[in-house]
Image (cartoon, helix red, strand yellow):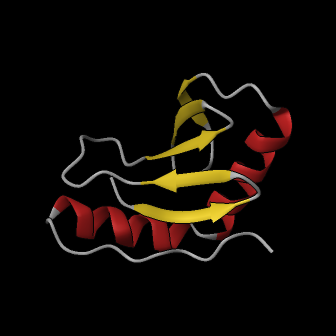
Amino acid sequence: MPIIAVFYGIIVRMFYKDHDPPHFHAEYQGQSGKFDFDGTLIAGDIRSRTALKLIAEWADAHNEELMANWEKARLGLPIERISPLD
């Protein structure tokens, strides 16, 4: 599963040809979660409020890029890295 961003110890990935609804996966300190493109935790065990806030902020800032990558991944095309939070 390709890494699309890394920031503050958070690793963000997106699967190729994954199932709907559009989402990404994030890992933080051995915990993982599945998030919608608004940055809302759909499933998983990330418990850090700070990490959840940072993931939501990042997703909000890169919503269009996430959707573009989702469409590419669904078609099996290469996906792009997305810039991290500064």
Picture residue at 68% right of the left edge, 69% below the top: 61
Picture residue at 23% right of the left edge, 55% below the top: 16
| The C terminus lies in quadrant | bottom right
Question: Which of the pair 36/33 is nearer the observer?
Answer: 33
Residue 69 higher or lower than 40, as above or below:
below
Residue 21 higher or lower than 56, as above or below:
above
Q: Residue 18: percent from the left, percent from the top?
A: 24, 45
Q: Is residue 76 left or right of residue 51?
A: left
Q: Is residue 31 left or right of residue 56?
A: left
Q: Residue 78: percent from the left, percent from the top?
A: 25, 75
**Which quarter of the picture shows residue 76?**
bottom left
Residue 46 higher or lower than 10, as above or below:
above
Picture residue at 37% right of the left edge, 72% below the top: 68
- Seen from this angle, which residue lies furthest left? 75
Picture residue at 41% right of the left edge, 65% below the top: 67
Disc tally is 0
Q: Is residue 8 left or right of residue 70?
A: right
Q: Is residue 48 left or right of residue 58?
A: right
**Which quarter of the picture shows residue 26?**
top right
Residue 73 higher or lower than 79, as above or below:
above
Q: Residue 4: percent from the left, percent from the top?
A: 47, 65
- Seen from this angle, which residue lies furthest front? 30
